[in-house]
Image: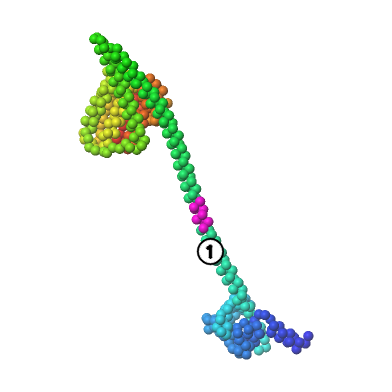
Amino acid sequence: MNNQQQKGLYAAIFNTVIDGVITIDERGVIQTVNPAAGELFGYTAAEMIGQKVNMLMPEPHHTDHDGYIHNYKTTGERKIIGIGREVMGKKKDGTKFPFRLAISEVQTEVGKIFTGIIHDLTEQKRAENRILEMNRDLEKRVAERTEELSDVVNKLIQTNKELEAKERELLNSLERERELGELKSRFVTTASHEFRTPLTTIKSSASLISRYTEPGTEEKREKHVQRIQSAVVNLTGILNDFLSLSKLEDGKTKSEAHDFSLTNLCSEVIEHIGTILKKDQQVVLINNIKNKNVHAHERFIRNVMINLLSNASKYSGEGKTIIFKVENDDKTIRFSVKDEGIGIPADEQQHLFTLFFRANNVSNIQGTGLGLNIVKRYLELMDGTIDFESEEGVGTKFRVSVPI
């Protein structure tokens, strides 16, 4: 291939290559332009040749381009020559577009020539931008779906909690219903047993009284009258226990705190207990009351005192002494009841305040198993406390504390 043929080949390649090709001299003046470059920037070759190449650059490169060339000629530092980079170009109509610029340096007989290969990145950038936009849209949708899923999960968790709460409520209701069923059964059994004995006594004594009408039978008649009175007292106590329990279960038991004499209350309680004491039993009051007048729930305290003293008498033999100690300060009323009774078996003491509980050593003594449970409930209504110590065959001591 001769020189003419080579030139023709180079010209064909130069004019048909799809990327733009521009050559400039050392001053930055455009020497040649291929058709692809002219089409890319919107100029004819005649409009570009002889012009500074910075006509194809937006600011700040348009102004700084001569400085780039001078710096390279002075220092030899390459920032793009032989390296290539992505830059922005400016078309004839002012439109800016991205392209990949690769520059090579050629030394010729007339000086250095710089050849720039321009690869348009417009479509690539559009595709990248579309991908970025699609990614952002996808991320947004994922975030929305995640939020929706989170809402669904939270609702499921909340629903599950509500179902668990309802299940617990149902189980509690069933347990409560079972307990009520047991209570009713035990109530019927206890009531039947406790009512039968005094009623039988009343019926028997009332029948026998009619036989003792002759002079000289007054003592026998009086004995049966006392038996009837005692049976009536027992029935009254049983009914009072059931009535108190019913009111406590229904939440109808209320008491307003008010000022009253603690000393007078103790006297009234001892007088009441005196009517039910066994033969030769006595209650000894140890009065350590500092403040005679107190502000508390008098009715509840009276009921607790009477119940504990009644139990002390019931579970103690004839001729035994009951110690009733009362004291107070500015904040608390404290009292204790100590008997010399049968005591509570150690292995059963943990059940003492349970509804209908009766220890195995009281089978021959009448009772409903309600009293101490009622006492505990009264104290809970007053934010009070109760504890005890007991030894079987020796006796029992209850200690009560009630806030003023």
**Residue stretch rendered in magenta on the structure:** 148-156
Asked if residue 218 is positioned above or below residue 171 in the image, the reply reads above
Q: Secondary structure at mark 1?
A: helix
Question: Which quadrant would residue 234 be assigned to in this image?
Answer: top left
Q: Using a 10 Å C-alpha cutoff, classify the residue at mark 1 as few (fewer than 14 neighbours), some (14 to 19) or many (20 or more).
A: few
Q: Among all residues in the image, which is located at the extreme right?
A: 1
Residue 215: where, in percent of width, then height? 24, 9
Residue visible at 53% across and 58% down in the picture: 146
Image quarter where the C terminus lies is top left
Residue 291 visible, this orientation: no
Asked if residue 372 is positioned above or below residue 147 in the image, the reply reads above
- The chosen color scheme is rainbow
Residue visible at 38% across and 30% down in the picture: 353
Residue 338: where, in percent of width, then height? 31, 25
Which amino acid type is shown beneath numbered disc 1? Lys
Residue behind mark 1: 140
Front-most of residues 323 and 238: 238
Image quarter where the N terminus lies is bottom right
User: Residue 150 lies in magenta, yes or no?
Assistant: yes
Residue 225 falls left or right of residue 119: left
Question: Which quadrant would residue 176 be assigned to in this image?
Answer: top left
Residue visible at 33% across and 16% down in the picture: 204
Residue 126 visible, this orientation: yes
Asked if residue 246 is positioned above or below residue 87 in the image, the reply reads above
Secondary structure mostly seen in magenta is helix
Front-most of residues 36 and 208: 208
User: Residue 131 lies in magenta, yes or no?
Assistant: no
